[in-house]
Amino acid sequence: MANPVLPSSGVLSPLGLDAVRPAPGFWGDRIALNRDVTIAHCQEWEEREGWIGNFRGRLPRKGREFSDSETYKLLEAMAWADHPALPELAETVARAQEGDGYLNTRWTGNRYADFEWGHELYCYGHLIQAGVARLRMHGEDRLTEVVRRAADHICRRFMDTSETCGHPVVEMALVELYRATGTDRYLEMARRFVERRGLPALGEIPFGRAYFQDDVPVRRARSLRGHAVRALYLASGVVDVAVETGDVELLKAVEAQWERAVARRTHLTGGMGSRHSDESFGEDYELPPDRAYSETCAGIASIMLSHRLLLATGDARYADLAERTLYNVLATGVALDGRSFFYANPLRVRVPAEPLNGVNHAAEGGLRSPWFDVSCCPHNIARTLASLAAYVATSDAGGLQIHHFTPGEITQGSLGVRVETGYPWSGGVCVRVLSGGSGRISLRVPAWAKGATLSYGPAAPGGANGPGGGPVAGPGSRLGVGLGAATSGISHMSGAREVEPGYAVVEGDWRPGDEIRLELPMAPRWTFPDRRVDALRGSVAVERGPLVYCAESVADEPPLADVAARVSSPPTDHLTDHPTDHLTGHLADSPAGAPAAIPAPEAAGAEAGAPVPVAGAPVDPADPVADTRSGPVTPGDPVTDAPGGSATPADPVTGTPGGSVGSAGPEGDPVVEVEVAVVLGAPDANGWPYGPVPDSVAGVDTVLRLVPYHRWGNRGPATMRVWLPVAE
């Protein structure tokens, strides 16, 4: 089966890439763009920077000590995407392998001299993951031969030592190779690497051994800590080892670490990492918005860990965090054109960045960069999007579970379904049966979706099933919440009934044409931080569905530092006035490649009391959107549920106005922005930012238009903030 994670046991079993076929939509378009643009972009830059040339023996060697790993991630992305450039690149890599299986362009002739920083085993880990992808997608070939020889070399060299690598990843790679080949020594090697860490196995460094997760053994650690990517890669490998060896204690240890880190060390976006100096988690509740590191690779590693815990336990909270991170870190990490990337993902940018057309020599920056000296993030994005369909759905003995909503078709045994949705812009999800089968179909109801409703039955009288068809044969159809739960049955399209967060489960004998319809409430909502997060006290953010929103001000006019939110007024939807091309972000009626035109501030009227343009979006005082959207969206209302208050009845699945802007196809995305009431204050002129009484907010009442966080930074240099001060 073609899947990056195939455990031999667990509550849920993943479906392969051949069983989940995304259609155009939020993720389907990104998967296609990745295959057609991003993978080639990465290969072009690797050639330009000389990293692939290292495998050809070119001197002097180029890139950092771990640059080999970037080529291996590229190979993995190519393998999952069935990219035609893979065989030639794999052959280039294969020619650099030494006779005993050793392969590293930096350390050949000086092997294993620096376990703390050398990254040799780390590079092997990514090579092995590429080989597993190729083995599962294609079968044995030159690349898989190279990988087996490298893995055997690792086992010979390290099985009976106390050594390990300063950067984990080889652990989960070896477990996956064991799963793919059945070779026991790969699992045993991974287990020993896990058990050595924290004894300690590595030397002392200025950051401390916690940076390597080498301060305490894995079983005794209380939280994810240290370098965020290292911690999350290690935890993923630990879950893999625990599942394959039946080590319940080890699995419980990681669950507890995940739980504490999510509760105390995770940003609103799902991003992890609060410190730039060592790319690490901070202490509990150390979550500054402007210094949030939130590396894209850490977000991807978090998705990997959450997915593994979901498979092992079936607990919806792991899919909830994966979804949050997918939409607000992974999707943010790559530009809409697929050719530039964020390494760090702060939640506040105070100064517009200078445009950069070449290599970014730093990790941070307020604009996406085409390349970095350390380009782990572009390659991680490429391999994750190439395999993303494997994260969408699972199965168990009882049936099918759909965890992430994207248009497409899913096959599980004899059961085939088509998912139709405009998610994340709208909350309607329709699962239509294409080929019949018996069992449960479970749809995840996110934790934020209080008031979600579910209906099910035949699509229509006289449809594919004939009158009265539907999931009614045998014991009938049953509705429940939670995997394995079910209640009373009916034999017609049910009325919508409320379902709780978790899993909404319908059981029956399914026939072609049967439908399940889930309606998730998509009203934008205020989100307040825990009082123990000092850096966020007195502030508020906006979420809508799975998306986090932010204020973006091109050239910082008006300045976002002077904005405060009036939380007594609920945030409201605003549908963008023009359809945008799905991924370029350009107006459909703009010249190709031209950014959306932004009217000058004076176009909106700047007289006292009139709304002023904030974050690059002018607001007309007479705009019917602002006038008609005086409260939250009412779920299920076919008029008000249309983003932007359109008077055109909305499609019940896509949630977009019928026949107007925003169909779910590739011709346009129904991008929903959000408007909030704010006070735009004047800068304090007293010359001193402290005083004997609490600061008060005074200024002009206006409207601030927020954009989805994943879309910020696509219009040029801008300031940005997710968390807004509260005005009252």
Image (cartoon, rainbow, N blue to C red):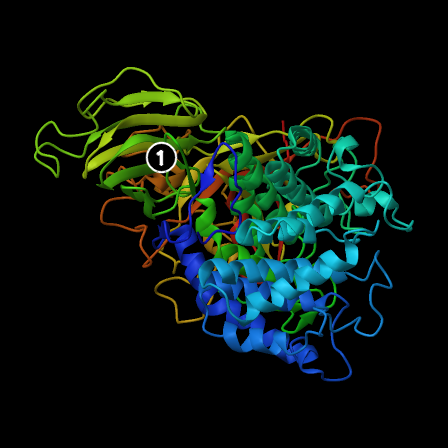
Q: Quadrant of the C terminus?
A: top right
Give the residue number, with chain letter if any, for mark 1. Answer: 628
Above or below, 427 relative to 338: above
Q: Residue at x 21, y 28 (%)?
A: 471
Residue 448 image position (x, y, % from top left): 49, 29
Q: Residue at x 31, y 43 (%)?
A: 419
- Amino acid bearing label 1: Thr
**239 or 679, which is in the foreground?**
239
Q: Is residue 291 visible?
A: no
Residue 85 image position (x, y, % from top left): 49, 75
Residue 237 image position (x, y, % from top left): 66, 45
Instruction: Tell me which corner region of the image, top left, top right, bottom left or bottom right, holds residue 698.
Output: top right
**168 or 371, which is in the foreground?**
168
Taking the image as shown, residue 157 lies to the left or right of residue 556, namely right
Instruction: Tell me which corner region of the image, top left, top right, bottom left or bottom right, holds residue 638.
Output: top left
Q: Residue at x 79, y 31 (%)?
A: 220
Above or below, 33 relative to 635: below
Local SS, label 1: helix
Q: Is residue 47 visible?
A: yes
Residue 142 image position (x, y, % from top left): 55, 72
How crowded is the residue under tag 1: few (<14 C-alpha within 10 Å), some, or many (20+)? some
Above or below, 608 relative to 4: above
